[in-house]
Image (spheres, rainbow, N blue to C red):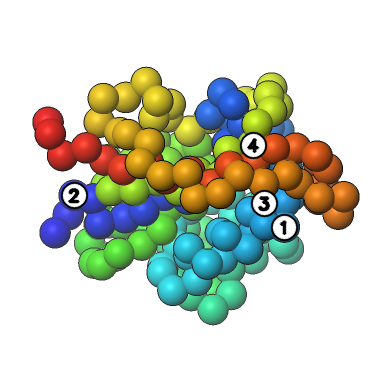
Amino acid sequence: MSRGRFIAVVATDNSWGIGKGGRLLAHVRRDMQYFRELTDSLPVIYGRKTLATFPLGRPLPGRRNIVMSRSGITVEGAEVVHSERELMRTVRGRAAVIGGGEIYALLLRHCSKVYVTRFHRDFSCDTFFPNLDDSDEWALTGVIDTFTATESDSVPGMKCSLLVYERQENE
Ligand SMILES: NC(=O)c1ccc[n+]([C@@H]2O[C@H](COP(=O)([O-])OP(=O)(O)OC[C@H]3O[C@@H](n4cnc5c(N)ncnc54)[C@H](OP(=O)(O)O)[C@@H]3O)[C@@H](O)[C@H]2O)c1
């Protein structure tokens, strides 16, 4: 069981952009709730630069955190793995890949589903998720919901969609 046992969870703009200047694009409460629902019960895997974007630079509470770094850092509350090979040995079951750009690109081949929150905007990003619409290996299989960001979100009025992409097994 090595191919496709992970899911990826990501928020992108219209151009598959995911970040700018080391930061997320927007804070939308509904998206954060959805992220929690999808990942709460799973180990989460992410890159060292994404760790730096979390509150106080700390791992997410209440689940197994695996940080990828080639360096010798230690992170309280997380396991650090230094290569894809070490990761695949360390995480034996299902897990959620949660960013950022380098780690999504590295681990997409181990994912069977990608949960995309699409922000219907262009944010002039400097970091991207692979464009699944351009890939024969991936198909959009579900639109869970479409909603509008509220006044308490960082981009009020922005249209958002919760999309599911699945790996096509017809290769
Ligand atoms: N929109 C979203 O859903 C979302 C989600 C997460 C993050 N983001 C955004 O994405 C951006 C960060 O992404 P990023 O691509 O710059 O960084 P990243 O993927 O979070 O982390 C990159 C780091 O991971 C480590 N790494 C990469 N490949 C590795 C390998 N094969 N083995 C071991 N370690 C490896 C390296 O750490 P060392 O340098 O320590 O060796 C590298 O510097 C930010 O803007 C963030 O806000 C967006």
Mark number displayed over residue 3: 2
In the rendered structure, which disc, 1 or 2, sits on the residue that comes first in sequence? Answer: 2
Is residue 109 left or right of 148 when viewed as pictured?
Answer: left
Label 4 – label 1 distance at C-alpha: 13 Å
Q: Nearer the viewer, residue 166 or 91?
A: 166
**Of the image marks 2 and 3, the number of the one nearer the N terminus:** 2
The residue at label 3 has a CB less than 8 Å from ligand 1: yes
The answer to which quarter of the image holds residue 55 is bottom right
Name the residue that disc number 3 marks: 53
Query: Mark 2 is on which residue type?
Result: Arg
Q: Is residue 72 visible?
A: no
- Residue 156: image location, x then y, percent: 83, 43
Q: Secondary structure at mark 4?
A: strand
Which badge, 2 or 4, is on the more N-terminal residue? 2
The answer to whether marks 4 and 3 mark residues whose Cβ atoms lie closer than 8 Å is: no
How far apart in space, not on screen, are marks 2 and 4 (Cα)?
29 Å
State the image coordinates of residue 21 (x, y, percent, origin top left).
Answer: 71, 33
Q: Secondary structure at mark 1?
A: helix
Residue position for label 4: 119
Mark 2: give few (<14), some (14-19) or many (20+) Cα within 10 Å.
few
Q: Picture coordinates of residue 125 (x, y %)?
A: 65, 26
In the picture, the disc for residue 170 is none
Q: Amino acid at mark 1?
A: Arg
Q: Name the residue that disc number 1 marks.
A: 29
CA separation, marks 4 and 3? 19 Å
Q: Does residue 61 sit above or below 15 in this rendering? A: below
